[in-house]
Amino acid sequence: MQFSPTNGDFTFVSSTEAEDLTGTISAPDIKLNMGSDSGKDPYATTFLRQRGYGWLLEVEEEDSEETKPLLEELDIDLKDIYYKIRCVLMPMPSLGYNRQVVRDNPDFWGPLAVVLFFSMISIYGQFRVVSWIITIWIFGSLTIFLLARVLGGEVSYGQVLGVIGYSLLPLIVIAPLLVVIGGFDVVSTLIKLFGVFWAAYSAASLLVGDEFKTKKPLLIYPIFLLYIYFLSLYTGV
């Protein structure tokens, strides 16, 4: 007994007729690509890619860029900081230093290091002065910046912050002298005045330009008072 299929794909035969049937089933030629043939994807890879899961097979490439040094990552240029320190400590134009680089190319880490160092030498017996010195540096520079802008100066807050910070170096220089000759009141007072004038001149010569014209004293005087206050924080007066 034989049943004819409706779709033409399968044929059902009776058990008696099946005894005469012979044949073989050939296996399909299936090859797994394990990566030897770079032109063809494995079947599993093809299966995943066709169904939108190809991202599971992606391998993140290693960053080819070389790791930058820490100082470069933090934008710290030690040579530039050292040059600016010399410009502040030796403000005389005759020495040939390009002192305008302190103002025109401001940085943050150099002035911060100077302020922190000045704070460290000021903590003898008065540890709370450290945070106060940093506060005075930030807000004192802001006051000088606002005053300079009101007077018509073309300076940024970053420039004022850098110049005021670097110009604390003269006060750091005279600090050891004050320790040595602290018992001589007259000499100690003269050294203090010299240090304040030195610091104020270094800052004012960079911040007070020709654009202020007759208004220069209006900016030089607050800068001078700011460094007197810095020195008073160190000496405890």
Image (tube, rainbow, N blue to C red):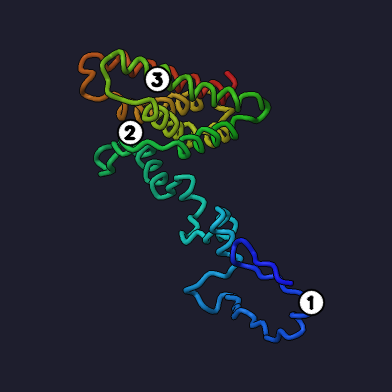
Q: Circle 2 sits in a helix, a strand or a loop, which is it?
A: helix
Residue 15 circle label: 1
| Extreme residue in the front direction | 1
Between 158 and 136, the one nearer to me in the picture: 158
Name the kind of residue labelled 1 in the image: Ser
Q: Is residue 186 visible?
A: no
Give the residue number, with chain letter if any, for mark 2. 103
Between 17 and 149, the one nearer to me in the picture: 17
Q: Please provide percent x and percent y for residue 134.
A: 54, 26
| Extreme residue in the right direction | 15
Instruction: Name the quarter where the N terminus is drawn.
Output: bottom right
Q: Is residue 209 visible?
A: yes
Give the residue number, with chain letter if any, for mark 3. 224
Q: Please provide percent x and percent y for residue 196.
A: 43, 25
Name the kind of residue labelled 2 in the image: Arg
Describe residue 33's horizontal placement relative to residue 201 as left or right: right
Q: Circle 3 sits in a helix, a strand or a loop, which is it?
A: helix
